């Protein structure tokens, strides 16, 4: 089994998301275990301080190394005792770009693995914690207020790839795929899909009635033709790096 130990100052963000929908069901089915840990648990002062000013000046606060170190050490110890191999990840805006390929790899570890994920906040981490981190990942070229969303991205993308997590109605079979050609990102987008009604009517901005109709071939029942049609409707895009 895969386990996620998320270290955060906002455990409720992780819990609220992970207890709902497909990820919630995956936990109930024991395909994955997700525990959000409050970093303040590993503080020793009465104010439960997790941050402080930056040496050398600069705006904002940094997450202190000691509670993070204690959290990593404690969670690694418990993971090993429970028969898991611990692997520590940190959410970092300038980290390695997280991809579907990486999600695939993390979803099929060769042994039971506990992913211990550190969520940054404020201006980020005291750099000394990175000596105890195996991988720093970024979910995209933008800066968020905290590492909770990136952690949820990791949990969600990895969990849905674990066998039997998705039911037939949510299958990961024919999805958008991503690959890199050098620095360029190539995306093969899923073909357009439709559900009932076969005809949808609406009034446009000029007050005229319009009707959108599902392509008849998709309602023909001819599986070979439908497959060919869907394949031809995939949208291939290349996002150039420059
Ligand atoms: C306000 S950000 C800190 C940004 C940091 N000062 C910088 O310039 O890179 C606070 C935290 O959010 C998380 N974070 C923000 N953007 C992220 C991204 N694109 N991917 C992963 N984590 C991110 C990191 O944990 C980070 O420490």
Image (cartoon, rainbow, N blue to C red):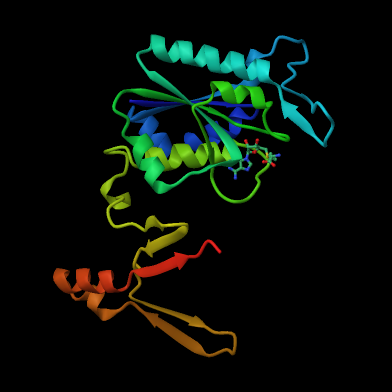
Q: Position of residue 143 (x, y in %)?
A: 66, 46
> Does the rendering let one see residue 233?
yes
Left or right: 175 in relation to 211: left
Q: Residue at coordinates 65% horizontally, 38% vertically from top-left?
A: 146
Q: Is residue 38 left or right of residue 176?
A: right
Tell me: residue 159, above or below residue 126: below
Quadrant of the rendered image holding ligand 1: top right
Q: Is residue 109 above or below residue 67?
A: below
Name the quadrant containing residue 212. Answer: bottom left
Residue drawn at x 62%, y 20% as measured from the top left: 68
Q: Nearer the viewer, residue 221 or 197?
A: 221
Q: Residue at x 44, y 47 (%)?
A: 99
Which residue in the rendered view is the most extreme toward the front?
Answer: 182
Q: Position of residue 196 (x, y in %)?
A: 34, 69
In the image, residue 133 above or below residue 98: above
Q: Image quadrant of residue 204?
A: bottom right
Using residue 47 as the reference point, say whether residue 137 is left or right of it: left
Front in this rendered view, residue 31 or 110: 110
Residue drawn at (66%, 27%) of the image: 127
Can residue 20 be spotted in the picture? no
Measuring from the top left, give residue 161's x and y in whole percent.
33, 41
Q: Position of residue 51 (x, y in %)?
A: 74, 24
Front residue of 16 and 235: 235
Q: Residue furthest right?
A: 57
């Amino acid at each position: 089994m895969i386990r996620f130990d998320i270290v955060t100052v906002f455990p409720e963000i992780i819990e609220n998301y992970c207890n709902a929908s497909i990820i919630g069901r995956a936990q109930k089915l024991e395909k994955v275990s997700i525990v959000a840990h409050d970093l303040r648990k590993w503080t020793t002062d009465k104010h439960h301080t997790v941050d402080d000013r930056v040496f050398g000046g600069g705006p904002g606060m940094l997450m202190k190394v000691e509670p993070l170190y204690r959290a990593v050490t404690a969670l690694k110890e418990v993971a090993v005792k429970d028969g898991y191999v611990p692997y520590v990840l940190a959410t970092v805006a300038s980290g390695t770009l997280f991809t579907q390929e990486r999600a695939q790899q993390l979803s099929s570890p060769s042994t039971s693995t506990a992913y211990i994920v550190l969520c940054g906040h404020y201006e980020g981490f005291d750099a000394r914690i990175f000596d105890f981190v195996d991988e720093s990942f970024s979910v995209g070229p933008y800066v968020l207020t905290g590492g909770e969303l990136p952690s949820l991205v990791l949990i969600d993308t990895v969990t849905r790839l674990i066998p039997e997590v998705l039911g037939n109605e949510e299958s990961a079979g024919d999805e958008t795929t991503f690959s890199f050609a050098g620095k360029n990102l190539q995306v093969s987008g899923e073909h357009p899909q439709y559900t009932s009604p076969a005809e949808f009517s609406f009034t446009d901005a000029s007050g005229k009635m319009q009707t959108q109709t599902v392509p008849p071939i998709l309602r023909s029942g001819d599986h070979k033709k439908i497959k060919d049609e869907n394949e031809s409707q995939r949208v291939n895009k290349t996002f150039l790096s420059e």
